[in-house]
Image (tube, rainbow, N blue to C red):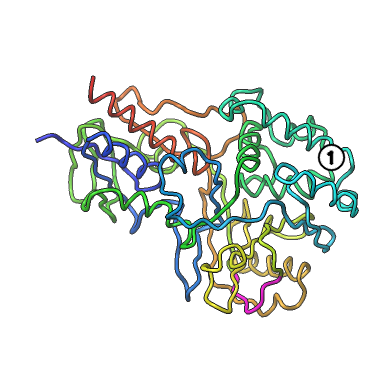
């Protein structure tokens, strides 16, 4: 009897790997330590609210989204291009400089940029837009690399514009308020925002791994089965040894380092506070950016404005993302004080639905960034995950698929 390929981990990379292996006619099973699929991309239902485990979005320009999914079935709801910048406790709508340049000009005429930047920032934005649109996206990951903060200054952005707009926008996406992440990742994320939307599925981000899992035969995924050790010939779980034709470690970076040894994978932590309210603090489908260093939240979204399915009828869901923060009662109260400065005393009546502290929100992607790292080790074990590619949903999906292709080629050799 032919042994199956054993995939360790039912996150996006592991699911994508198993689905691709099945497509190639190769039997695969997944062993997962937790009680569900998705890894870091899961959704909890609390009192009728949909709470993604940490504020997350899908960028619709990701190539693997269209290659691996029935996008229509996800029922994606998109944020509007642009953002609300809370600067000196005043809301300022900034048009997306990439998607709506004509709106940006009208914004400048109203004095917006003078409040958060300088006219020279418009020139820098236009130059950046032209630079990012020219090459194929993959080439953006091969250029000169330096910290994003240095990259932005070299591009000609003023300190005021970086602090009020770019730091909360980019730092929120990359979980890096200090902007030390690779400039290559900045370029690729900005290109994705230029080419598509930020969106969430109607039933929460958990719909993304659920769609992949539904393509696997019953009995493929084994939950509640933590793996104690791995070898090229199988894995050891609490109930004994599971023999394998090939083994794929598809866990998040720190767990992969534990199982495989070698270099420790750095982590970008993130916290998230979910509030429920009877009244939305605004009616826009825009991300809200903290333009001042006035609290722990870097960006906030009224999720029920973007996707009404995220909250029961007549209620609203507000997500506050806190990159680099660990949630405590003091952190929650500091977040409430910060939002009270934005939207007044109504914030005091908001209910805290849930909080999340995610120690490994993303892999560290400081310079130099080396995407598309090898998926086959010298000991014959295969490994995939966003820590082998780019720290993103795109990176996890792409890594899983290319790992499956490598396994299939190895079995055919």
Q: Position of residue 401 (x, y in %)?
A: 38, 35
Considering depth in this image, is 235 or 26 the residue closer to the camera?
26
Q: Residue at x 65, y 34 (%)?
A: 187
Please check the rendered image and state whether residue 280 is part of the magenta-colored stretch, yes or no. Answer: yes
Point out residue 327 in the picture as x, y percentages from the top left corner.
58, 61
Q: Image quarter for residue 339?
A: bottom right
Question: Mark 1 = which residue?
Answer: 121
In the image, which residues are magenta? 275-281
Q: Is residue 52 left or right of residue 345?
A: left
Task: Please indicate whether residue 256 sits to the left or right of residue 240 in the image.
Answer: right
Residue at image position (44%, 36%) is 398
Residue 341 location, quadrant: bottom right
The reply to whether residue 253 is in sight is: no
Relative vertical location of residue 188 with respect to residue 172 in this rendering, above or below: above
Residue 22 located left or right of residue 53 = left
The quarter in which the N terminus is drawn is: top left
Query: Would you place residue 291 above or below residue 120 in this image?
Result: below
Q: Does the stretch in magenta take in 127? A: no
**Could you tell me residue 89's position as x and y percent?**
82, 63
**What secondary structure is found at the residue carrying circle 1?**
helix
| Residue 226 versus residue 43 in the image, above or below | above
Q: Position of residue 353 (x, y in %)?
A: 54, 72
Residue 202 seen by the camera:
yes
Q: Residues within 10 Å of mark 1 (few under 14, many from 20)?
A: many
């Amino acid at each position: 009897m032919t042994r199956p390929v054993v995939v360790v981990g039912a996150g996006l990379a592991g699911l994508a790997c198993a689905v691709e292996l099945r497509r190639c006619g190769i039997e695969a099973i997944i062993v997962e330590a937790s009680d569900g699929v998705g890894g870091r991309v899961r959704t909890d239902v609390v009192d009728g609210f949909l709470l993604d485990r940490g504020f997350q979005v899908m960028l619709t320009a990701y190539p693997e989204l269209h290659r691996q999914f029935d996008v229509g079935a996800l029922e994606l709801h998109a944020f509007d291009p642009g953002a609300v910048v809370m600067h000196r406790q005043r809301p300022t709508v900034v048009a997306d400089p990439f998607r709506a340049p004509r709106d940006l000009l009208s914004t400048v005429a109203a004095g917006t940029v003078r409040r958060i930047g300088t006219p020279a920032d418009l020139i820098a934005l236009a130059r950046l837009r032209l630079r990012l649109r020219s090459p194929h996206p993959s080439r953006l990951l091969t250029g000169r690399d330096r910290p994003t903060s240095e990259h932005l200054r070299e591009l000609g952005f003023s300190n005021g514009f970086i602090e009020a707009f770019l730091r909360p926008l980019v730092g929120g996406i990359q979980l890096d308020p200090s902007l030390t992440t690779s400039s290559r990742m900045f370029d690729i994320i900005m290109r994705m925002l230029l080419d598509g939307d930020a969106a969430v599925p109607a039933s929460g981000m958990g719909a993304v791994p659920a769609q992949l899992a539904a393509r696997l035969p019953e009995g493929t995924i084994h939950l509640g089965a933590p793996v104690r050790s791995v070898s090229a010939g199988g894995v050891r779980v609490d109930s004994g040894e599971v023999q394998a034709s090939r083994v794929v470690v598809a866990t998040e970076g720190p767990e992969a380092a534990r199982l495989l040894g070698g270099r420790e994978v750095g982590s970008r932590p993130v916290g998230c506070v979910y509030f429920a309210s009877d009244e939305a603090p605004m009616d826009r489908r825009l991300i809200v950016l903290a333009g001042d260093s006035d609290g722990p939240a870097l960006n906030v979204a009224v999720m029920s404005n973007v996707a009404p399915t995220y909250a029961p009828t007549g209620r609203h869901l507000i997500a506050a993302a806190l990159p680099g923060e660990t949630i405590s009662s003091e952190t929650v109260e500091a977040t409430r004080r910060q939002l009270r400065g934005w939207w007044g005393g109504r914030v005091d009546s908001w209910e805290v639905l849930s909080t999340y502290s995610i120690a490994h929100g993303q892999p560290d992607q400081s310079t130099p960034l080396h995407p598309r790292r090898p998926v086959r080790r010298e000991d014959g074990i295969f490994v995939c995950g966003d820590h082998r590619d780019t720290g993103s949903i795109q990176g996890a999906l792409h890594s899983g698929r290319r790992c499956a292709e490598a396994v299939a080629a190895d079995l055919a050799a």
